[in-house]
Amino acid sequence: MAITVAYQHAPLWIVALSAPAAALILSFSSVLVVALVKVVLVDRFEPTVKPLWCSFVWLNEVVNGLYESVAATAMAPLMGTPSSRHACG
């Protein structure tokens, strides 16, 4: 609510300059949250053979779904830019 009120009273040039910065900050923070969830749930990938019903495979699928729905969507505007090299590793 406070952000909406601030944008209503701010000049248009401030809103135009701060919106891309806010989008970039939110994109990188969502990528970091997904990476943190991956580290907490799966840790590092190592070559291994596990059955499909074990928790490692299920947690890996959770991280994969989270990446595809949150992080990939947040990084889509950065693809093809110099920033994507830093966001994707």
Image: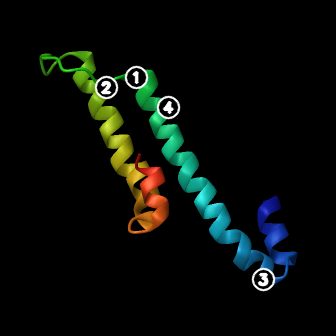
Q: Is disc 1 in contact with disc 2, using a CB cutoff of under 8 Å?
A: yes
User: Most extreme residue toward the bottom, as rendered?
Assistant: 12
Q: Position of residue 27 (x, y in %)?
A: 54, 55
Q: Quadrant of residue 85?
A: bottom left
Q: Secondary structure at mark 2?
A: helix
* Residue at image mark 3: 13
Q: Is disc 4 in contact with disc 2, using a CB cutoff of under 8 Å?
A: no
* Residue at image mark 4: 36
Q: Identify the mark nearer the N-term, 1 or 2.
A: 1
Q: Residues within 10 Å of mark 3 (few under 14, many from 20)?
A: few
Q: Quadrant of residue 38?
A: top left
Q: Type of residue at label 1?
A: Leu
The image quadrant where one finds the C terminus is top left
Q: Residues within 10 Å of mark 2 (few under 14, many from 20)?
A: some
Residue that appears at 78% across and 83% down: 13
* Residue at image mark 2: 59
Q: Type of residue at label 2?
A: Leu
- Mark pair 1, 4: CA separation: 9 Å
* Residue at image mark 1: 41
Q: Position of residue 88 (x, y in %)?
A: 40, 50
Q: Type of residue at label 4?
A: Leu
Q: Quadrant of residue 75?
A: bottom left
Point out the frontmost of discs 4 and 2.
Answer: 4
Q: Is disc 3 in contact with disc 4, using a CB cutoff of under 8 Å?
A: no
Residue that appears at 46% across and 31% down: 37
- Mark pair 3, 4: CA separation: 35 Å
Q: Type of residue at label 3?
A: Trp
Q: Position of residue 20 (x, y in %)?
A: 63, 70
Q: Residues within 10 Å of mark 4 (few under 14, many from 20)?
A: some
